Amino acid sequence: MADRSWSVPTSARPIAGRSTALTARSAIEHAATASRIAVRGVTAGATGVTRLQGLHYVSDAMPGIRRKGSKRFRYLSPKGRTIRAPRTLERIRALAIPPAWSDVWICADPNGHLQATGRDARGRKQYRYHPRWNRLRGRDKHARIVAFGTALPKLRSAVRKALAIPGFPKDKVVAMVAAVMGTTLIRIGNEQYAESNHSYGLTTLRNRHVQAMRRGGLRFQFRGKSGKLQEVMLTDARLTKLIKRCQQLPGQMLFQYVDADGHTQPIDSSDVNRWLQETMGEDFSAKDFRTWGATALAFRALASNDPPVGEDGKPTPDTVLAAMENSVVEQVAGVLGNSKTICRNSYIDPSLYAAWRSGQLSRYAKNVRGERQWETAMLRFLRSQHPMKKLSH
C-alpha cells in the first residue's frame, strides 16, 4: 500500500497578518517524499561522521558528570566522586554552562561529540557540543539530509507496522506523530512553550486544535512559534481515521497513548526523537523532517523550470533571478510557518540556487513522473553536492 501520508504538503500556511497561502497546484505540488526509494552507497550519519573527526558519538543517557550546588558548583564523576582534576575542571568551565541551567549533564569523555546538556529557566533542553562537532555540523548541515532521505524507507516501514498495532500503545502513537510530521512539516512542539506562550506543535496540540472537514481529512488550527496562527490540512484517510479515534481518548491532549495499566499518557518531543533515532539508526530528530521537506519543495519548484533567457539571448539580470528564487522561498516559508530569512538560511539547501541558475538542476528532473521519482531525483542531486569525502578532514 502506498504511503500517501508521506507527500510533502503544499497547502499549509501561516494565516496571521499577510497571507502566504500556497495556491499549490504549482511547481511544488506533490513535492516529494515517496514511500520507497532505491539509493545505495550513502552512509552519512552522526556515528560514522564522528569517527572520521576523531570524536565519539555519545548521548546524555550515558553516565556523565553531574553539577551540584546553586552558586558555587561542584562536579561529581559518574561514580559520584568530587572532581578536582584541573584539566577536567578547565574543560567544564570552557563550556560556559549558564548557572540557571538545571539537570545538567556533562560528558565524561573530552572527545564526546556532545559535551553537555541541561534545562534552561523555561524548561527547554539545551546543548553544548564539541567545537570540532560544531565546525562539522556547519559543513554537514545539508549533507546529513542525504542520510536522512536514505533512511526514510526504513522509517516508513516502521510506521506502517506500528500503525497496524491494535489499540493505542506508545509506539503506535509516536508513529502517528512521525507520519503527520512527514506530511505536514508541523513543528514537534514543546510543553513549556504551550504553557508559557500558548504556542503549540504536534506533540502539544489539544483536541480543540483539530476539526474534521466535510469532504474528509482534518484541519489543524493553532498558534505556532512566534504567535503565528497556523492552518494545516491533512487529507490522508488512514491518519484521519486514527486521529479521530485518538481524540476519543480521555483528556485534552491530541496525541496520547494507553499504558499497560489502561491510563492515557501524553507523547512528548523526546519520545518522538528517541523513536526516530532507534528506528532510523542515526542521530536524526524532528527538525530533519522540516529541512528535508523544505529542500524537497524548493527542488521541485526550481527543477521544474529553467531560468528564463534574457532579451536577445543576453543573460537574465540577477534581479530577475533573485526575485524568482525569493518567490520559491516565500512559498516554502509559508508551508513551514517561518520567515523567508530563516527558511532560506536554515532549511533550504543553498546549492539548489547555483545549480538552478546554471541550468543544471533541471537535468535531474528530466522525465521525472510522480512523487517517488521526484524524491530519487532530489537525492541524486544532493549526493552530487555532498559526497561523503567532504565530511572528512
Image (cartoon, rainbow, N blue to C red):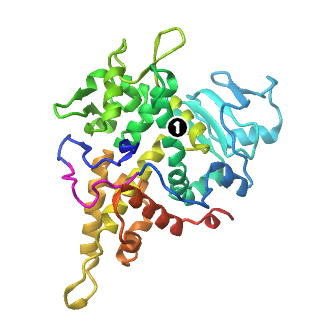
168 left or right of 125?
Answer: left
Mark 1, residue position: 158
* Above/below status of 370 relative to 69: below
Q: Main secondary structure of the magenta part?
A: loop
In this view, the residue in front, 320 or 261, is: 261
Q: How far from the left and from the top, in percent, is residue 227?
A: 28, 35
The quadrant in which the C terminus is found is: bottom right
In this view, the residue in front, 376 or 222, is: 376
Q: How far from the left and from the top, in percent, is residue 58?
A: 69, 40
22 left or right of 281?
Answer: left
Residue at 64 percent across and 37 percent down: it is 116
> Pointer 1: residues within 10 angstroms few (<14), some, or many (20+)?
some
Q: How far from the left and from the top, in percent, is residue 110?
A: 75, 44
Residue at 33 percent across and 30 percent down: it is 199
* Above/below status of 49 relative to 168: below
Q: Is residue 25 magenta?
A: yes
Q: Quadrant of residue 376?
A: bottom left
> Which span is picked out in magenta?
21-33
* Above/below status of 367 relative to 51: below
Residue at 40 percent across and 60 percent down: it is 373
